[in-house]
Image (tube, helix red, strand yellow):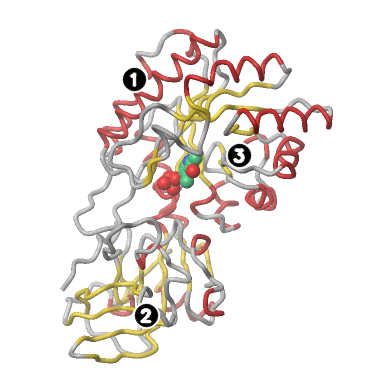
Amino acid sequence: MKPLGPIPTGYSAIDGVLAVGGRKVTDWVDEEGATPLFLYSADLVRSRIAQLRTALPERIALHYAVKANPFAPLLAMMNGLVDGFDIASGGELEIVRAAGIDPRAVSFAGPGKRDAELEAAIVAGVTLNLESEGEAARALAIAERLGVTPQLAVRVNPDFDLKGSGMKMGGGAKPFGVDAERVPALVRHLIDAGADWQGFHIFAGSQALDAEAIADTQAQTLALAARLTQEIGQSPPRCNLGGGFGIPYFPGDTPLDLDLVGQRLAEAMAALPGKIESTQFCIELGRYLVGEAGVYLARVIDRKESHGEIFLVTDGGLHHQLAASGNFGTVVRRNYPSAIATRFGAEPEEEATIVGCLCTPLDKLADKGGFPRADVGDLVAVFCAGAYGASASPASFLGQGPARERLV
Ligand SMILES: *Cc1c(COP(=O)(O)O)cnc(C)c1O
């Protein structure tokens, strides 16, 4: 038997069936008329945001990194709950605008922004987090041609990274941001060129569960912002401190100590030099806001045995939940939290491997987990499906098409 990841808090059973948003998942599936289905719990997102507001210093604004989950109803709900949105493409700009989000609350990072994307963002009044001097030159030229003042921030490639993070995005040679030592010259150039300089974006990594590591990185980030401010001689209107707050996906993972992060951040902010006192700081979070609020549901289509092992074959798979199959940025495959949704809370009775319907051995949702007995027609739940699920999986693979999604 291989262990399963920890099921996030906030899930319970009604009559032995997993409940989301106060109803049995079987009710939601019946209403939708088909599986596979992603369910996103509005209550769980709201309570996570409330926890953050309580734990973090009041001065810290909260941004949502749209790439974690760009589902339109979710974005529309987020609109009243967070202070800003971070996008990473022109496509996401269209998505946030369609959701009714004010482009002035949006910042746009990401390498390889095309001229058309820069133009759309500048016209809309979105803040561009510039990734290079070359991108800065293109943005300035486009703004001049259009006769508008661009909102420009500089993404800094910090000279440190977030220890223990799943994805390092700073420290050393990187395609992201401008190396810290070249930032003051670029900022002075932007100001001289007449741009509305918006400040810094400093993002050092993702998916960290170690509060001390996050706190150390935030302290380093603040110190770097202060040093850059000193060199530039003008304080940044805004400073995005990055994020990197992780969620437990795998056996042995424990939740982030949010209170410790908040305490240490308050201490680091209290120690800031005067020059940076008027700066509006924010953090940007994706998976921490929405990851644990999502469940992926698939139906068991076949139950079979091979060489003594039980396989539950579902109508879902890696084309919707690439990360749960272990093929999205993980080195060793480990089990996501999963359960038989129609026997939620029942004791494990057998070892079974839950697979998808794709004709590839990669398509595993749970490998040799302990589950109550499931048969054809039962529903399987894969948790931690609220971030990097539907939009980060190859839905067209094998002609399968996208899953249904619903905010409840
Ligand atoms: C992907 C990304 C995020 C979100 O990361 P999470 O791990 O989902 O919180 C935030 N900021 C930037 C710059 C990113 O690239």
Residue ID at (32%, 73%): 14
- Give me the C-alpha separation between circle 1 and circle 3: 27 Å
> Pointer 1: what residue?
268
Give the side of residue 231 with respect to residue 312, left or right: right
Residue ID at (29%, 26%): 264
Check disc 2 and give the amino acid type: Leu
> Pointer 3: what residue?
108
Callout 1 touching callout 3 (CB < 8 Å): no
> Which part of the image, by quadrant, shows the N terminus?
bottom left
Quarter holding residue 144: top right
Residue 249 placement (x, y as % from top left):
30, 57
SS for dot 2: strand
- How many dots with numbers? 3
Judge by depth and name the residue closer to the eye, 142 or 269: 142
Question: Is the CB of the residue bearing disc 1 within 8 angstroms of ligand 1?
Answer: no
- Against 91, residue 334 (above or below) is below
Residue 310 placement (x, y as % from top left):
24, 86
Question: Is the CB of the residue bearing disc 2 within 8 angstroms of ligand 1?
Answer: no
- Give me the C-alpha separation between circle 1 and circle 2: 47 Å
Judge by depth and name the residue closer to the eye, 17 or 150: 150
* Label annotation for residue 379: 2
Residue ID at (30%, 64%): 336
Residue ID at (56%, 51%): 77
Number of the front mark, 1 or 3: 3
> Considering only order in the chain, which callout, 3 or 1, is on the residue closer to the N terminus?
3
Residue 46 placement (x, y as % from top left):
45, 49
Judge by depth and name the residue closer to the eye, 166 or 69: 166
SS for dot 3: strand
Quarter holding residue 125: top right
Give the side of residue 38 with respect to residue 72, left or right: left
